[in-house]
Image (spheres, rainbow, N blue to C red):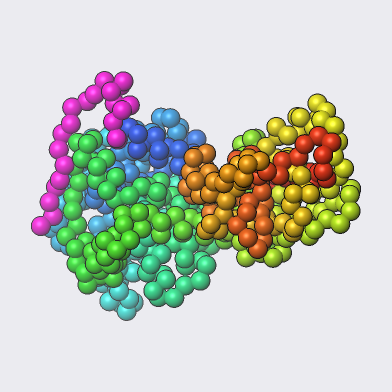
Amino acid sequence: MNDVKGGLRPALPYYLMKQTFPYQLRKRIETDIRAQSLCPPGARILVGVSGGADSVCLLDVLVRLSEQLGVTLHVAHLHHGIRGESADRDASFVEALAGRYGLSVTIGHRDVPAVAAAEGIGLEEAARDIRYVFFQEMAEETGADRVAVAHNREDQAETVLMHLFRGAGLQGLCGIAPIRPLDQGEPDGIQLIRPLLQVSRAEILRYDGESGLDWVTDETNADTAYTRNRLRQELLPVIRDSFGEAAVRHIAEAAGHLQHTRRELEMLRKGEARPVPEATEPEARIRKMPQAALGQLPGELRIPVLPERDAEQRLLLPGVGTLLCRLMAAAPVTEAVLIRQTDLCTKTLDYDKIKTALCVRTRRPGDYLILDAAGHRKSIKAIMRDDKLPVADRDHTPLLADPAGSRVYWIPALGRTDGSARAHAGQGTHLLLTLIPEKETM
């Protein structure tokens, strides 16, 4: 049965509404939208709405954010000709839903089973292809430059797993992109966007429930004859039971990291400069070492022992910048030196207390930093946690470390250095380290 679910919830005063889950989730989605330039001001967005919980959530979020984002909306729904009366009911539901929001709506009808039979392809594949052709036609007809669909975090994880099981390289393991051309042959044409890609299914259901939204349920979603449904209904529960609730999120996050890698590699292939984050703080610019660099660590990013004073080594860190290492005689502390010592991107160590090769690498199990001259240690894992380094950045943050051991001498993103190897005025041989973020590299 195709049930209508949901209820009514009375409006709340604004000061109370800001404390609600729906409001907080909308703000999170708005942040994602702006960070990824999904909905630039002035955009005309065609919103694909099936009537299910995901697309109902998407539409409500975009309606409530439309003024802040400066966008206009048009609703589109495709009747696939598969489920008879229940599909008719879905189309009527979406038409009424758009009307309640005061939005214009287009309801399309296609005979997907006939197309699938004629072309000898599966119903899932035919439905997907026809749906995107419909979106392309409706976007052109309505003048939309964006088409928004409601893929979520679970959809991302399912896609990655399906590609992996069928055999995939980097492109396949990137999964679903948050934004891509609707027509792959027209990179500058209408863009397909997925504002809910970092939102879980449970969060969507909670949003709809607490917002008093109705939705319809497609009974075919429970049919495990379809590959994706079987993966969703049978495999994901096993993964969650075996590895915890966070497992699905980790799969989806891995896809995001691989998308970043692919963009970096494509820019390197074309000889283009990679975009530099807008943030001006050194921490924001050096925090993440892209996956594209990881294949070179630690061997090619090793700093040899510097044999002479005033010798200098330059080490290019792909996607991060350039590390300058200069060996120099200890100097009296001057105002200029003090300023440098407080600079996140410049540190001075007592090289006489190191006397080994160094490398720039990412963290490993067992890594630690010596906190003080007494030799007290703290694990890099604990430091990153206590210093509130975002979880997604921790495996990609560059460290200056012993290539053969677990001792870390400098965490540029956090401004942390080995407490037993700090340089003192007039003592020892100083190793001056300067990390120049890529934007500033000459």
Instruction: Give 138 or 101, whichever is nearer the viewer.
Output: 101
Q: Position of residue 240 (x, y in %)?
A: 29, 60
Residue appearing at x 15%, y 45% in the figure: 5
Left or right: 387, with 83 as reference point: right
Instruction: Give 54 or 430, whichever is nearer the viewer.
Output: 430
Residue appearing at x 67%, y 57% in the figure: 402
In this orientation, does residue 222 appear? yes
Q: Position of residue 125 (x, y in %)?
A: 34, 69
Check the image and report above or below for 65 versus 120. above
Q: Is residue 198 found inside the magenta-colored segment of the image?
A: no
Residue appearing at x 35%, y 63% in the figure: 158
Residue appearing at x 19%, y 57% in the figure: 218
Q: Position of residue 436 (x, y in %)?
A: 74, 44
Instruction: Give 66 or 119, whichever is nearer the viewer.
Output: 66
Left or right: 8, with 364 as reference point: left
Instruction: Residue 339: name its quadrant.
Output: top right
Read off the magenta span: 1-22
The residue sitting at the bottom extreme is 120
In this orientation, does residue 110 appear? no
Instruction: Residue 294: name its quadrant.
Output: bottom right
Q: Position of residue 77 (x, y in %)?
A: 29, 51
- Most frequent secondary structure within the magenta stretch: loop
Query: Is the N terminus in the top left, top right, bottom left or bottom right quadrant?
Result: bottom left
